[in-house]
Amino acid sequence: MYHKKIIVVTILFLLLTTSCSSLNQIVYQPNIDQGNYLTSTDIKKIKKGMTKKEVLHILGTPMLKDLFGTQTWFYICRQQLYRKKVRQQTLSLTFNNFDVLIKINKKSS
């Protein structure tokens, strides 16, 4: 009878303590990278007046293309390193009707 009580108490103790935040530090969480990873060197190569073909050669395929006729490309990179806040970098490139780059907008958060 005494052994059953010890087993029950042990099981209850384990169940109650497994949700503690200290265990959260033990569990491995990988770094998560999503989207277009752009280096500062690649971004510096982009200049107004370049064609879409030249931009594609340097940066690759954009993550999103604007569907509403503004000819804007979006390169988005989201990173979550271990347990830190998510960082997002967005590079938007706007082209004119002749496929020439006219506007560069970079945002980081």
Image (cartoon, helix red, strand yellow):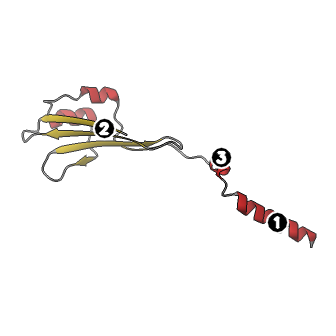
User: Does dot 3 land on a helix, a strand or a loop?
Assistant: loop
| Marks 3 and 1, how far apart at CA | 24 Å
Residue located at (18% from left, 32% from top): 54
Which three-letter amino acid code belongs to the residue tagged 1? Val
Looking at the picture, which amino acid does disc 2 mark?
Lys
Mark 2 is surrounded, within 10 Å at the Cα level, by few (under 14), some (14 to 19) or many (20 or more) other residues, namely few
Query: Residue 15: image x %, image y %?
Result: 72, 63
**Residue wearing tag 3:** 26
Q: What mark, if any, has residue 107 been given in the picture? A: 2
Using the rendered view, name the quadrant where residue 93 is placed.
top left
**Residue that appears at 43% across and 42% down:** 79
Q: Which of marks 2 and 3 is nearer the N terminus?
A: 3
Determine the CA span between mark 2 and mark 3: 34 Å
Of badges 3 and 1, nearer the viewer stands 1
Query: Where on the picture, by quarter, is residue 52?
Result: top left
Quadrant of the snapshot with the C terminus: top left
Q: Considering the numbered disc 1 on the image, is that residue within a helix, a strand or a loop?
A: helix
